[in-house]
Amino acid sequence: MWQFPVSDQVPQISGNRQACGNRFDKQQRTFIQMRTVLKVVDNSGAKKVMCIQALKGKKGARLGDTIIASVKEAMPNGKVKKGKVVYGVVVRAAMQRGRCDGSEVKFDDNAVVLVDKQGQPIGTRVFGPVPHELRQKKHVKILTLAEHIA
Amino acid sequence: MASQVLPQALHMIPRNQVQPFNPVKNRGFSAFLSRGPSPLTTSKVSVSGFHSKFPVGSSFSCFARRGFVVRAESNPEGEGEAERNENGVEEPETKAEAEVEGEGEGEGEDEAEEEKPKEPRKPRIKLGDIMGILNKRAIEASDKERPTPDLRTGDIVEIKLEVPENRRRLSVYKGIVISKQNAGIHTTIRIRRIIAGIGVEIVFPVYSPNIKEIKVVKHRKVRRARLYYLRDKLPRLSTFK
């Protein structure tokens, strides 16, 4: 029987559900925590950041939460440089987020938009889809800049 | 306490007291017992003592055959009022439960049954069927407002959703159904689509009142029930205009 390749395909991190049966049955996506590398989807200059603190939540940050991150990779001329500590709002998460009507949404990657301490985005454009959970979290500016609201 | 009332209650049971408690018979009292309220447990002990002291005829032997459940029944008089007052919230619940069961008859409970005029025997609804019946009713109720088409894995569907936050227009979600989880009223489908270069999967409860319309646009032939392999494949396969 064909099994999933035993490579890094299955990030079997202890998630919020018990893994029963075969390990490869279901991919278990979990929170955004320290050392999680996220993609930056605005034009602030950074390319990749590594989360160093999830501001809310004991286990980690989820979709719509704010994190503190350190810039690991940046464009040569940008508003932020490599090594800078920034705040960010998680706009896409591989972990599903439940909505109040019973639906759930999940994306294929983890992405963040850099903001300042007040919550205003540093960049002027946001790429890719964003969920409308951000409206509830009062990140209206990011929603208006977004390409597509999922 | 109830013990003073009991001697009379024990004698009177077969004739008078069973009638008001008929619907709540075994089910209701077993439900009571499972909740384990203290008046019932204390009464059990006292009744067993009474059994030995008052070996009254056939009615009790037939009651005793039922053992556990019966002892609670044997003193409905003293406990009934107490139960009604204390478990006022639980009572209508169990009564409603019993009504849903369609006044289930006892397992051949004798004299007390035949006394009152019986309606034609309804098919007995078992405990295990209740959830199925409730789910079916809920699905019928939701189908009346909005008919749900038959959805299968591999369908390319378009869903019009009303989001209370959005207020302005209906959000449209298009994509391929990669899985369907059947759970009665909470039957969900998982829609996958590439939006703006990123794959997005959304789980929709099919019978949700927020969903204003589900339309099957196309169908793709698939040989699986869950299309999770699409996550590893090229984005081209999950793109739908």
Image: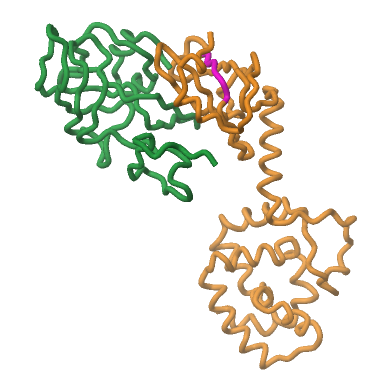
Chain colours: A green, B orange
Residue A143 position, x and y percent, is: 33, 13
Residue lying at 70% horizontally and 26% vertically, measured from the top left: B150
Is B100 above or below relative to B207? below
Query: As drawn, is B101 to the left or to the right of B202?
Result: right
Location of residue A4 in the rendering, given as x and y in whole percent from the top left corner: 45, 37
A105 or B91: nearer the eye? A105
> Does A131 sit above or below residue B47?
above
Q: Is residue A86 above or below residue B38?
A: above
User: Is residue B103 shown above or below B141?
Assistant: below
Residue B198 located left or right of residue A119: right
Q: How many marks?
A: 0
> Where is the N terminus of chain B found, in terms of image quarters?
bottom right
Q: Can you name the residue that lies furthest to the front here?
A: A1
Q: Which residues are magenta?
A: B172-177
Rendering coords of residue A134 (x, y %):
34, 20
Please state which of residues B135 and B164 is positioned toward the viewer in this rendering. Answer: B135
Quadrant assignment, res B72: bottom right
Q: Residue A12 sits in which quadrant? A: top left
For residue B173: magenta? yes
